[in-house]
Amino acid sequence: MSATPSPISLGTIGSDAGIPNLNVATVPAEIRHGDAAAMRAYSEGLAFEDMLVNELTQQVSKAMFDGAGSGEAGANAADAGPGSPGGLLGGAGAYASMVPQALTSSIMADGGLGMARSFAQELDPALRGLGR
């Protein structure tokens, strides 16, 4: 027995992508007025973009709180010795774990960085060339 894909609509794009607070006004017009395949492709693109943005924010957070970045902040953290708070915000360790998810949620709720449209165009060739 094969599983049928769940019905998708403009209102469910964000929740299907794992982005419960997505502002649907930021969804491109060709997706808003498109068929279920276009909405599904965009939803999958958003989910992938969400994963990428989450990885990016984790790296930014790591550099800010741990000093694990390159350049002066990373060098200073390495010189500080074990157990010392490194990074720009090294003393705020209790909040460090919340930053990546908060940044990701904020970015994605406002439509992301714009990569989902490109991903959707690759997943659904009918969208190529629309809305440029």
Image: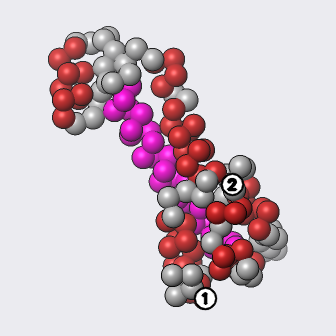
Q: Nearer the viewer, residue 40 or 104?
A: 104
Residue 127 visible from this viewpoint: yes
Q: Which colour assignment does the render follow? A: secondary structure
Q: Amino acid at mark 2?
A: Leu
Q: Which residues are magenta?
A: 39-65
Q: Give the overall secondary structure of the magenta segment.
A: helix
Above or below — where is 102 with respect to 94?
below
103 magenta-colored = no
Helix, strand or loop under label 1: helix
Separation of disc 2 and disc 1 at Cα? 24 Å
Report which residue position mark 1 lands on. 126
Q: Nearer the viewer, residue 83 or 96?
A: 96
Taking the magenta stretch, the answer to whether it contains residue 58 is yes
Mark found first going from the N terminus, 2 or 1: 2
Whether residue 3 can be seen here: no
Question: Disc 2 designates what residue?
Answer: 22
Q: Residue at x 54, y 45 (%)?
A: 104
In the figure, 94 relative to 98: above or below?
A: above
